[in-house]
Image: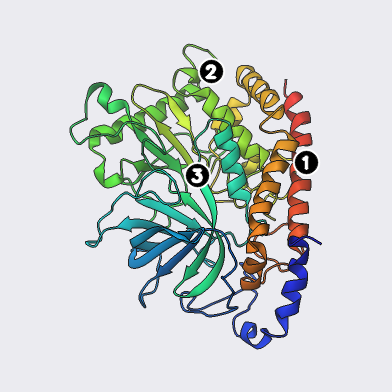
């Protein structure tokens, strides 16, 4: 019997021992479905874990009595140990991150490397390129622990940048918090979103053409304003009453955008949309092709459709434009509800198009812009999509390659006993956590579901994409 086969046994074996401790903390929310509710999770001491076993890289964070909040970042001490030695030690500024995941007791965090004066300073952590902005993502509703890691690795293999990731464990204020994914925050940087840096005086000529990062996303901090975003001129549909689509400024930050820069990138996106909406949008010279990097749109489409990402195209949707270049889609972001892990709007289905979300859920506030349905009406775009899919299915997106990645993640997590420790700390196996479409009683069942879902999805995509023309 392998280590992961023992998860259910180990969890059940400690239930009586910890019953009275867990009783004080466990709850089931009818609207969010979270399995655990900890009122002050930075100070809780549930399920002490023996961390003497050689494990994943360990993040140890001490907030010195302060509570981590959504904003602003608070000062903390951090260290990262790996293979018995310290990889990093220093000051950080840390905050809670996420939107719909914030009610979960297992929080995700964003942090910056700080100096003694609480100023940003670059650092290399666990071998990643130097930067100051990082993320500790805590998979909770994703009980496989690996959906984001998998899709980011596939994107990177397709030569489309995605955040570098590494499985780690977190000890927060002396309490073990389970398996986390250490990853890069998406931002303009030569090792991340590699576009030109806009200097203060670059407001004319070719300097004005890049670089920019924009995104379609929620904005829970202050809402949408004319300062931080602009409205798509067409929205979600060309043929029906259209829902509003907002496009947020990501880089430069809204407060750093001069009027010239704001006008330039807004006008450029308007030109993209006007070209897509025109009767000549298929024209290779005068149509949309003159404004967008079609290959990046094709790859972005494939990754969202492969995973049936229920948030795809409408939330956490990044785009960027470099100097003197066309608009590119990506990098991809936040796929924890992909690969069948959502029970609404057909998020768990393997036989639907993710880009047709609006047809299934027309009343959702966040709608997919009309761009994708328009592109799918162009035989030239569909032909490039088919060609790219055929190429990828022979290697990177073959079932064997994807399953090998899944198995490699399991091997890393299993040999360090991190799976056992995570689910001893967060006893959610066999429990619905919003928005699970499947609830496995064991970790093995969660992995079996993930693999089965991927297999069905790949087979379905082969048929539907081949039959588009």
Mark 2 secondary-structure assignment:
loop
Image quadrant for the N terminus? bottom right
Residue 29 visible somewhere in the drawing: no
- Would you name the residue on which mark 1 appears? 455
Classify 10 Å Cα crowding around label 2: few (below 14), some (14-19), many (20 and above).
Answer: few
Q: On screen, 77 above or below 292?
A: below
Going by the picture, which residue comes out furthest to the right? Answer: 1
Mark 3 secondary-structure assignment:
loop
Q: On screen, 341 above or below 238?
A: below
Residue 231 is left or right of residue 198, and the answer is right
Image quadrant for the C terminus? top right
Residue sitting at 17 percent across and 32 percent down?
201
Residue 424 visible somewhere in the drawing: yes
Q: On screen, 170 above or below 463?
A: below
Residue 147 is left or right of residue 468, and the answer is left
Dot 3 or dot 2: first in sequence order is: 3
Query: Marks 3/2: CA distance?
Result: 41 Å
Residue sitting at 30 percent across and 45 percent down?
254
Residue 152 in the image: state x and y as whole percent.
56, 42
Give the quadrant of residue 118. bottom left
- Would you name the residue on which mark 3 appears? 164
Which residue is more in the foreground, 26 or 60? 60
| Mark 1 and mark 2 residues within 8 Å of each other at the beta carbon | no
Q: On screen, 370 above or below 51?
A: above
Dot 1 or dot 3: first in sequence order is: 3
Query: Marks 1/2: CA distance?
Result: 39 Å
Dot 1 or dot 2: first in sequence order is: 2
Q: Nearer the viewer, mark 1 or mark 3?
A: 3
Residue 301, numbered label: none
Query: Marks 1/3: CA distance?
Result: 25 Å
Which residue is more in the foreground, 139 or 1? 1
- Would you name the residue on which mark 2 appears? 279
């Amino acid at each position: 019997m392998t280590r992961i086969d023992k998860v259910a046994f180990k969890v059940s074996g400690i239930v009586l021992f910890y019953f009275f401790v867990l009783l004080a903390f466990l709850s089931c929310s009818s609207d969010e479905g979270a399995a655990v509710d900890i009122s002050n999770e930075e100070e809780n001491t549930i399920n002490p874990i023996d961390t003497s076993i050689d494990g994943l890289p360990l993040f140890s964070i001490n907030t010195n009595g302060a509570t981590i909040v959504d904003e602003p970042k608070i000062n903390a001490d951090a260290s990262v140990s790996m293979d018995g030695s310290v990889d990093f030690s220093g000051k950080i500024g840390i905050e809670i991150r996420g939107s719909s995941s914030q009610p979960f007791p297992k929080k995700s965090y964003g942090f910056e490397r700080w100096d003694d004066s609480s100023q940003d300073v670059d650092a290399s952590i666990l071998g990643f390129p130097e930067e100051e902005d990082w993320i500790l993502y805590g998979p909770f509703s994703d009980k496989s622990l690996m959906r984001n890691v998998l899709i980011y690795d596939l994107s990177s293999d397709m030569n489309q940048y995605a955040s570098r990731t590494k499985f780690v464990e977190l000890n927060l204020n002396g309490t073990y918090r389970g398996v986390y994914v250490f990853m890069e925050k998406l931002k303009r940087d030569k090792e991340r979103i590699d576009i030109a840096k806009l200097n203060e005086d670059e407001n004319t000529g070719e300097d004005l053409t890049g670089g920019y990062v924009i995104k379609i996303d929620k904005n829970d901090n202050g809402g949408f304003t004319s300062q931080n975003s602009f409205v798509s001129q067409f929205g979600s549909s060309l043929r029906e009453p259209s829902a509003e689509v907002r496009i947020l400024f990501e880089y430069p930050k809204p407060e750093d955008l001069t009027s010239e820069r704001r006008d330039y990138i807004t006008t450029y996106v308007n030109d993209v949309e006007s070209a897509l909406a025109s009767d000549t949008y298929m024209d290779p010279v005068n149509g949309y092709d003159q404004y967008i990097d079609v290959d990046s749109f094709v790859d972005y489409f494939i990754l969202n459709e492969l995973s049936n990402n229920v948030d795809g195209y409408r939330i956490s949707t990044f785009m960027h434009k470099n100097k003197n270049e066309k608009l590119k889609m990506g990098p991809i972001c936040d796929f924890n509800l992909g690969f069948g892990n959502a029970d609404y709007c057909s998020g768990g289905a393997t036989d639907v198009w993710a880009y047709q979300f609006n047809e299934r859920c027309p009343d959702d506030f966040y709608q997919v812009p009309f761009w994708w349905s328009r592109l799918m009406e162009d035989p030239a775009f569909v032909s490039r999509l088919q060609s790219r899919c055929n190429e990828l299915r022979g290697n990177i997106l073959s079932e064997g390659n994807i399953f090998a990645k899944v198995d490699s993640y399991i091997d890393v997590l299993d040999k360090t006993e991190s799976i056992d420790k995570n689910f001893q700390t967060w006893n959610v196996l066999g429990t619905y956590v919003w928005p699970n479409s499947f609830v496995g009683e064991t970790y093995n069942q969660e992995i079996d579901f993930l693999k089965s879902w991927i297999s069905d999805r790949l087979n379905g995509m082969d048929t539907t994409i081949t039959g588009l023309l």
